[in-house]
Amino acid sequence: MALDLYEMGTHKVPPSDPNIMLLRGQHEKLTRQLAPPRAIDPLQMLPLELAEMTIKYLEFRHLVGLLRVSKAWLQLLISIPSLWSDLDFSTAKKPVSLGAVRKYIKRGKGTTTRVTLDRFGSNAEKIPRYVATRCRGLKDLRIPGGLIGASVLAAAPCASSLKTLIISKSCQMTCDVVSQLLSHCPNLERAEFQSVRPAGGRTAIWEIDMPKLRTLTLDTPREARRQGEYVLALDPLLTKIPNIHTLSVQGWVVRPSFPGQSVDFSNLHQLQHLNISRSTAVLPPQLPLTVHTIAMENCSHFSRVQRVSFANFDLPQVVRLSLAGWSELSWGDLQTCLTPSKGKVTHLDIGGCIALLSANLKELVTHGYLEGVEDLVLKSCNIDDEIAMLTARNVPHLKNIDLACTKITGVGVKALIIGLEDTLEHLCLDGCHFTTIDAVEFARAKGVKVAFSFPEPLRGGRRIRQR
């Protein structure tokens, strides 16, 4: 405080005063004396064991930065092999070459168990196989960056101890390559392939049983439907994964074994999470009673099936249900889905289910179906202010609600905010043309995060004269 007052005083001294330089010099001297000491190298102060314990909590990218601090730091870091057990190249600022990967694996001296490959540079196709051959204890391999499936397949025979394999959307591969990868890695517990395409007209052969597999993702790219029909022989695969816990097969055309027969997951007695969004199949599927989470968004069924029926859809343990995009979903079907787990569901997404009338939605809100719901998506549904008010009174635990593209007005928004003042955190009002900005500002003033925007109108094109 005294130093600050001294500085303020010097500003009032006229520049013509002969003592101005003396006063400023004294101020700088006092500032240096009172400043904290220079940074001290922790290696000079901490015991070596304590320094090692602290360093082990750092991420890989921070360790790489520490290599450039000094020679002492460099010698210390390369002398601890356990620091290089988790190599994550996804945050690299420069392309990662085979030489760089070789250098870091060598520092691990056989302790490397987890590798994330990304930002590939020269000899990218050789990197996966090199990692698999040099890291005999490799348990976790993740590839966010783009590679061809063949380079990953070449590494599989050398990675028999692998437990986790995650291939991102940037690395497309066929079902045939996926089946071979799973055959070469019998110890896999988690396998995610986020961009899979058909095997060039051939049916993938699932050769070996995979009793250790707990999580499997076989998703097609979002643009798959524009590139042709993606057919998956699902029944043979399900017989090979009896202990699966989480399964995602999005975007496939699933042919029934017999005409009119729905997809049967009922023999997977440990299945808890299922995602079959964007699929074309005879729906709804047959499911075990163990399912907790199910997503069937934007699904369609074969034209020969006259009516989608949820009559046998008995899931007492479901807590998350996503049926977005089912434009023909009736109120009776939704009731059948929710009744076995009435009051237990915490997440419900029925956005785009336009067949549900306003009266249906009122019954949904007032009859206890949403009593435990925390996340609710009603995008493009028949929502008005009355339903919003009912929601505020009958859904006490609601934290996040999506009302985009509905007819709610500022009255309904304020009723939600006041009725759920202690719980509501996020509110989506995108495309709500009847909502006023004052209601949005009222919600934000109450601490609620509000999304409120409108799609930009299409530009360009040929203008048509109106008559």
Image (spheres, grey):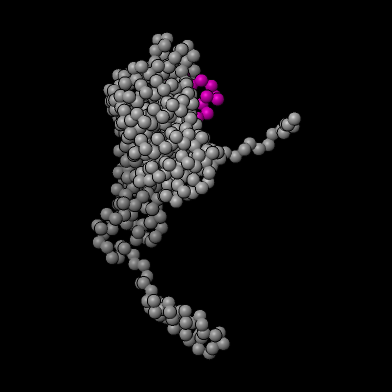
Q: Residue 234 in the image: x percent, y percent?
A: 39, 19
Pick the front one: 330 or 435 = 435
Which residue is at 30% across, 31% downward?
344
Which residue is at 46% across, 30% downward?
351
Quadrant placement of the N terminus = bottom left
Q: Is residue 440 covered in magenta? A: no
- Can the viewer see residue 134? no
Pick the front one: 17 or 158 = 17
Pick the front one: 326 or 274 = 326
Which residue is at 35% across, 35% downward?
394
Residue extending farthest to the bottom is 18
Which residue is at 31% across, 51% downward?
57
Quadrant placement of the C terminus = top right
Residue numbers of the magenta segment: 220-232
Q: Is residue 227 covered in magenta? A: yes
Q: Residue 107 in the image: x percent, y percent?
A: 34, 48
Would you identify the image quadrant in which residue 419 lies? top left
- Can the viewer see residue 343? yes
In this image, 199 relative to 53: left or right?
right
Q: Residue 127 in the image: x percent, y percent?
A: 43, 38
Would you identify the image quadrant in which residue 73 lies? bottom left
Q: Residue 104 in the image: x percent, y percent?
A: 38, 47
Pick the front one: 35 or 51 = 35
Is residue 456 depicted above or below 81 in this figure? above
